[in-house]
Image: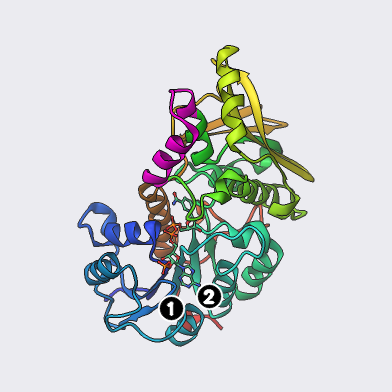
């Protein structure tokens, strides 16, 4: 029997989107079950081909001209393209905005309401507009996978949402902003503040706008997502108490080192409150991590503390997580689906993937 290949729209063709496109082109075991990317968009253009966009050519165009705008692209913006293409799966990898949640939320809502399943690494929708997204999910009956919005490749959200609810989670403490963690780590290795940020940017750890990291917005978005998934009463990133990393922090980090300690940016999430604060810890504390590593300690009433640790960002790590989420949708995985609709802690398995047209 000929298998149906869902039509995928790759929305956002930056560091993560392009890395995902390269992974889709690779001939590896992960390639199954066959991709059909019919549209690719950046902020200035949309490539659309029902027969499948030539991803190698799209990468070449983007990398030589920095834009999909020229070279046969449609004069549509992403919203118009979504309406015309009516894809089966949208991969949303545009910018994470901590105040309005746009453009990501508009894309996610439109995709779900149009009958598409969505995979996203964009923090905006769940951090800022949680209620609307949850409502659109319930009303549309479609699926949203968002495992990379917190922790990159570290399966923190899957663990919280699928594995631990019955253990009664009471809170999460974490080092979860990879770039500030990296910068504080490199200050400890003798680099200056600007040198450390430049290295973090070069390694792809920073947000497109690095002020999002320095001012604590990236961590605040992640804290809001954790809170909203765990505790039901949504908060926004603006509700999270934030302590920015400023040039003054360099002196503080150096003082901490002289005192035999380290400065870390610690995120705490409890019911009704969340914070991101620079905190001095002992040099041998488990919060002192190698560059690029995130750590999550999950407190539960019935199962003690669980710890997850790993590389929390970077285009390869994030694209790997997106790919895993995409595969789960394509395989229509059953009871073990790691990302039930948000808000449904004990959701029933969804049916296997069905084309958008088959949804009533
Ligand atoms: N990098 C990481 O390690 C990491 C980890 C976890 C999550 N994330 C999240 O993943 C997302 C992508 O990150 P990134 O590093 O790939 O960022 P990026 O390199 O800046 O890419 C963002 C892409 O979104 C496109 N875009 C922006 N506004 C758009 C619009 N209105 N319509 C269509 N496309 C639009 C941009 O277009 P142009 O190319 O034309 O500017 C660009 O292609 C962000 O939300 C980020 O927070 C990243």
172 or 293: which is nearer to us? 293
**With respect to residue 136, does 321 lie above or below?**
above
Percent coordinates x, y for residue 36 in the rendering: 31, 73
Residue 285 visible here? no
Residue position marked by numbered label 1 in the rendering: 87
Determine the residue located farthest toward the left in the rendered image: 27
Asked if residue 38 can be seen in this view, the reply is yes
Which of the image's four quarters has the C terminus? bottom right
Q: Quadrant of residue 196?
A: top left
The location of residue 174, given as percent across then percent down, is: 60, 35
Q: Earlier in the sequence, mark 2 or mark 1?
A: 1
At 30% across and 63% down in the image, what residue appears?
Answer: 33
Which residue matches tag 2?
111
199 inside magenta stretch: yes
Residue positioned 33% across, 82% down in the render: 73
Q: Are marks 2 and 1 in contact (CB under 8 Å)?
A: yes
| Mark 2 crowdedness (10 Å alpha carbons): few <14, some 14-19, many ≥20 | many
**Which element carries disc 1, helix, strand or loop?**
loop
Kind of element beneath mark 2 = helix
The residue closer to the viewer here, 324 or 346, is 324
Q: Please give the range of residues in magenta.
A: 185-204
Does residue 173 appear to the left or right of 120 in the view shown?
Answer: right
Disc 1 packing (10 Å; few <14; some 14–19; many ≥20):
many
How far apart are labels 2 and 1 at the CA level?
8 Å
Q: Say above or below: 241 vs 304.
A: below
Q: Quadrant of residue 45?
A: bottom left
Residue drawn at x 67%, y 32% is 299
Judge whether 266 appears above or below 356 on screen: above
Q: Tag on residue 218? A: none
**Residue 85 falls inside the magenta stretch:** no
Residue 300: where, in percent of width, then height?
Answer: 69, 33
């Amino acid at each position: 029997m000929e298998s149906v290949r869902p039509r995928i729209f790759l929305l956002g063709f930056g560091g993560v989107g392009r890395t995902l496109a390269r992974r889709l082109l690779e001939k590896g075991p992960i390639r199954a079950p066959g991709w059909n990317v019919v549209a690719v968009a950046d902020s200035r253009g949309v490539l659309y081909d029902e027969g499948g966009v030539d991803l190698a050519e799209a990468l070449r165009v983007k990398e030589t001209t920095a834009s999909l705008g020229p070279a046969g692209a449609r004069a549509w913006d992403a919203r118009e393209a979504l309406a015309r293409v009516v894809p089966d799966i949208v991969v949303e990898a545009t910018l994470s905005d901590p105040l309005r949640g746009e453009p990501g939320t508009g894309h996610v809502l439109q995709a779900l309401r149009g009958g598409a399943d969505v995979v996203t690494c964009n923090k905006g929708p769940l951090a800022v507009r949680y209620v609307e997204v949850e409502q659109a999910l319930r009303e549309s009956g479609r699926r949203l996978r968002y495992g990379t919005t917190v922790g990159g490749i570290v399966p923190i959200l899957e663990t919280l949402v699928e594995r631990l609810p019955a253990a009664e989670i009471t809170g999460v403490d974490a080092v979860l902003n990879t770039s500030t963690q990296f910068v504080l780590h490199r200050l400890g290795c003798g680099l200056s503040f600007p040198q450390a940020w430049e290295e973090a940017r070069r390694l792809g750890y920073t947000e497109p706008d690095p002020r999002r990291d320095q001012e604590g917005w990236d961590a605040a978005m992640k804290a809001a997502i954790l809170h909203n998934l765990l505790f039901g009463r949504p908060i926004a990133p603006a509700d999270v108490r934030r302590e920015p990393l400023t040039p003054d922090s360099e002196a503080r980090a150096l003082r901490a080192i002289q005192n035999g300690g380290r400065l870390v940016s610690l995120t705490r999430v409890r019911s009704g409150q969340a914070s991101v604060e620079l905190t001095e810890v002992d040099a041998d504390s488990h919060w002192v991590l190698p560059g690029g590593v995130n750590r999550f300690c999950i407190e539960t009433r019935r199962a003690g503390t669980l710890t997850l640790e790993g590389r929390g960002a970077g285009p390869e790590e994030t694209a790997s997580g997106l790919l895993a989420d995409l595969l789960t949708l394509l395989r229509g995985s059953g009871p073990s689906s790691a990302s039930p609709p948000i808000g449904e802690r004990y959701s029933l398995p969804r049916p296997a993937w069905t084309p958008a047209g088959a949804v009533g």
